[in-house]
Amino acid sequence: MGVTQRIMKFFDDRFDTETIKRFIDKQAHKRLPPHTSWLHVFGSLSLLLFLIQVTTGILLLIYYRPTPAEAHKSIQYITAKVNFGWLYRQIHAWGATFMIAALLLHMLRTYFYGAYKKPRELTWMTGVLIFILTVSFGFTGYLLPWNQIAFWATTVGTESAAKVPFIGEWLRYFLRGGETVTGETLSRFFVVHVIILPWLVTGLIAVHLVLMRMKNLATLDPVDQERDIPPERGIPFFPVHVAKEAVVAILLLAVLVTVSVLWPWAIGEPADPLSTPAHIKPEWYFLPSYQLLKYFEGPYGAIVGIFACTVPFVLLLFWPLLDRGKERHPRKRPWAVSFGLIGLLSALFLGVLGHYSESNVNVFGQRYHIDLLGWPHAIVEGQDAEDQGGH
Ligand code: HEM
């Protein structure tokens, strides 16, 4: 008996390896619906990015120190001294942005193909929870380098929590671990970022994947009329779909390393609680909420603002229970498709306004100052831009 057979026999005598083999075989040869395309790769891409985040995160943890005195210095040390530290720090920072982008594309795909409808409501709902937790990863991780931008962005971000009705003050205190952002906040964000969120997301991804596999991918047939996929028309998961996923995964890795090398994230100046930088903006995925909150001032306005920022996420979470239509094909769901497009364009529009607010832009040779609320004001030669901002 050869070595391989002896090893196999060792396991055969101790496990029911046949059942495991049959299970893997069944999963690998599953037939996916005929419309399964390149648009169906964003789920596995999100999974790959999560695994990259976990791996680079563990590497970062070896030298990172979560205290105000050491955090910034430890990141400098990782970047300058540790073998390939600069690379895995950059991949971790860019990976966060890529993962959120992959999740958004995956959500758009499942939304427009009506894949959230019965019997996949729970697959969608676990997905929305994963998305909210992934954004929380971004928020808590941003503070960890303890630089000026991170410190002040967290101060502004946690300040918005105070606007929540009834429990706002308590919530801000709870998030910060005190009245202001201090080492206490850093400890809290660290624990949430490296322990609580990773385990929660791992558990939710496991549930999500089991649910997805149990119900297979959605066809384009209406709810309760899904037909079995005929073997000759179905797309084999292995090797056809897996090959597509592998191509996209390799491209992703190439792009991730390229942007990490060409556009490294700065470490910035160490946090200084006594000096506020001029313009503090959050990461791109918070820009729509950041901009929306600006339109609601005063005690009642603030409550409406928080409401306006929360409702879209509640709608998203319960969407499969609200949209009771039976059709899945995008062409047969004009209302749901229009609603999705309006939501998407509004978020994009608010995001762009948030990005350009309080800055000067050049449009066809004319310079404009974009004020806090996103209104453009033409800049007249020789006059100071801020003077013309109006507000
Ligand atoms: C790290 C997070 C996630 C991972 C690893 C993941 C993984 C996957 C994978 C591999 C599939 C198979 C088909 C495909 O890729 O399109 C899938 C299906 C699905 N996912 Fe996700 N997903 C994640 C997050 C989300 C989010 C944020 C949503 C929506 C809010 C979502 C909703 C769905 C739905 C409804 C399906 C069923 C699609 C169908 O039957 O055609 N997932 N997911």
Image: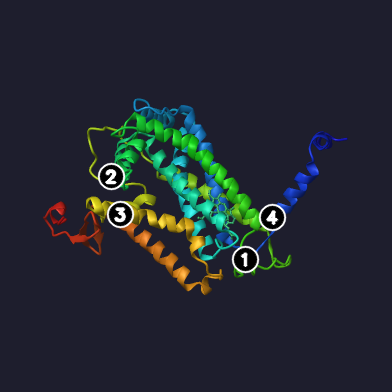
In this rendering, which labeled residue sits more in front, label 1 or label 3? 3
Dot 2 falls on a residue whose secondary structure is loop
Residue carrying label 1:
219
In this rendering, which labeled residue sits more in front, label 2 or label 1? 1
- Look at the image and tell me whether residue 261 can be seen: no
Dot 3 falls on a residue whose secondary structure is helix
Of pointers 4 and 1, the one earlier in the residue sequence: 1
In this rendering, would 381 be left or right of 333? left
In this rendering, which labeled residue sits more in front, label 3 or label 2? 3
| C-alpha separation, residue under disc 2 versus residue under disc 1 | 45 Å
In this rendering, would 213 be left or right of 319? right
Q: Which mark is residue 280?
A: 2
Q: Quadrant of residue 273?
A: top left
User: Where's residue 115, x and y in %?
Assistant: 56, 62
The residue that appears at 48% across and 60% down in the rendered structure is 319
Tag 3: residue type?
Answer: Gly
| C-alpha separation, residue under disc 4 versus residue under disc 1 | 18 Å
